[in-house]
């Protein structure tokens, strides 16, 4: 991915963070995905008083892309406050590998934290179609 595309994706995630609904934790996360057709879809974390009904920014963005019929997800940028609040949770990691184990994951904290990874490396023992077919 070109440097300008990377910056644009991170900027889109940073902007999406402004829309977070987090009255309980106060943690604001934004995410943006880039698809193979060149589209960008964004999401923010959305909390609920019943915590289990909350949805992370990463899944919001990915589900939005998939539900809109976007192409393959190539990359995701996640922006939070710091390293601690920017790494995707296990549920988000599983969804990432479902749609593209080779997806680039760019994690950025407004405090300067920056790390890139491949989705599959963040969840090396994920559920996958071949494993499920062994049932």
Image (tube, rainbow, N blue to C red):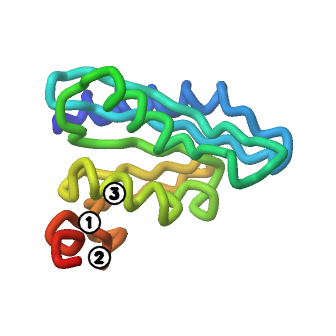
Q: Position of residue 90 (x, y in %)?
A: 48, 65
Residue hosting label 2:
124
Kindly give the residue lying farthest to the front in the view shown.
135
* Mark 1 surroundings within 10 Å by alpha-carbon count, few (fewer than 14), some (14 through 19), many (20 or more): many
Q: Quadrant of residue 125?
A: bottom left
Q: Quadrant of residue 74?
A: top left
Judge by depth and name the residue closer to the eye, 126 or 84: 126
- Please say if 119 is above or below 27: below
- Please say if 16 is above or below 84: above
Q: Is residue 19 left or right of residue 104?
A: right
Alpha carbon separation for disc pair 2 and 3: 16 Å
Q: Residue at x 49, y 49 (%)?
A: 108
* Mark 3 surroundings within 10 Å by alpha-carbon count, few (fewer than 14), some (14 through 19), many (20 or more): few
Instruction: Kindly indicate whether the residue at mark 2 contacts the one at mark 1 (C-beta within 8 angstroms).
Output: yes
Q: Quadrant of the N terminus?
A: top left
Q: Could you say whether the residue bearing mark 2 is in a helix, strand or loop?
A: loop
Residue hosting label 1:
120
Q: Position of residue 9 (x, y in %)?
A: 36, 31
Q: Position of residue 5 (x, y in %)?
A: 25, 29
């Amino acid at each position: 991915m070109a440097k300008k595309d990377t910056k644009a994706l991170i900027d889109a995630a940073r902007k999406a963070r402004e829309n977070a609904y987090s009255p309980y934790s106060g943690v604001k996360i934004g995410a943006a995905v880039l698809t193979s057709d060149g589209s960008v879809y964004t999401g923010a974390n959305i909390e609920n008083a019943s915590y289990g009904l909350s949805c992370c920014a990463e899944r919001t963005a990915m589900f939005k892309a998939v539900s809109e019929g976007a192409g393959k997800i190539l990359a995701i940028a996640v922006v939070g406050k710091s390293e601690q609040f920017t790494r995707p949770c296990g549920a988000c990691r599983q969804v990432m590998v479902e749609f593209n184990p080779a997806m680039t994951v760019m994690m950025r904290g407004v405090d300067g934290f920056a790390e890139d990874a491949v989705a599959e490396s963040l969840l090396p023992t994920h559920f996958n179609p071949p494993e499920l077919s062994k049932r």
